[in-house]
Amino acid sequence: MPPSAVGREEGRGHLALRQEAAAPWTPASSRTCNNPELRSDLEEVLRAQGITHLVLCGIATSGVVLSTLREAADKDYILTVLSDCCEDSDEEVQRVLISRVFPGQAEVVTIEEWSATLKL
């Protein structure tokens, strides 16, 4: 099951992540900035579980999604961006990132295209 936000540490901008209905030993991750990997233990958790492929989406395509994509690509993760699950306040920036920038480091697909590839 995908991670879900469960709370923020007051005043410090931390976001805790955990897997719903996860085993008691499942680690949580916290972050201190817009990039969920930067300054957090998320990479350690992903590597410990053998996760090498990340699927990215979110609000602020030019912020959180771009920052995460760049860092994850530098760390040799396989990346997929869900184009119709990303949004930016600047439509032109959104268009350029999705159509020209992201394809250089990630597979860019719609959620329908991606979900069709899942093994159920």
Image (cartoon, rainbow, N blue to C red):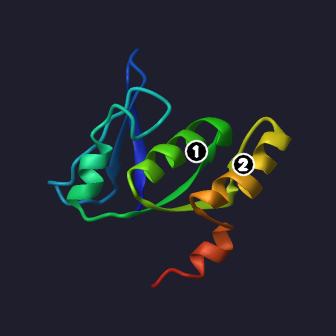
Quadrant into which the N terminus falls: bottom left
Horizontal and vertical percent position of residue 86: 67, 50
Identity of the residue drawn at 66% across and 68% down? 109
For residue 108, which numbered disc appears in the image?
none
Q: Nearer the viewer, residue 75 or 92?
A: 75
Q: Nearer the viewer, residue 108 or 45?
A: 108
Horizontal and vertical percent position of residue 73: 47, 53
Near mark 2 (Cα within 10 A), the count class, few <14, some 14-19 or many ≥20, is: some
Mark 1: secondary structure: helix
- The three-letter amino acid code for the residue at tag 1 is Val
Res. 6 image quadrant = top left
For residue 65, which numbered disc appears in the image?
1
For residue 97, which numbered disc appears in the image?
2
Horizontal and vertical percent position of residue 46: 29, 55
Identity of the residue drawn at 63% across and 58% down? 104
Q: Is residue 85 above or below residue 111?
A: above
Q: Is residue 89 left or right of residue 23?
A: right
Q: Residue furthest bottom?
A: 120
- The three-letter amino acid code for the residue at tag 2 is Leu
Identity of the residue drawn at 32% across and 63% down? 51
Tell me the CA gap for discs 2 and 1: 10 Å
Q: Which badge, 2 or 1, comes first in the chain's sequence?
A: 1
Q: Decide: marks 2, 1 in contact (CB < 8 A)?
A: yes
Quadrant into which the C terminus falls: bottom left
Q: Is residue 109 above or below residue 83?
A: below
Q: Is residue 108 above or below residue 59?
A: below
Q: Is residue 115 left or right of residue 3?
A: right
Mark nearer the viewer, 2 or 1: 2
Q: Is residue 42 above or below residue 53?
A: above
Res. 112 image quadrant = bottom right
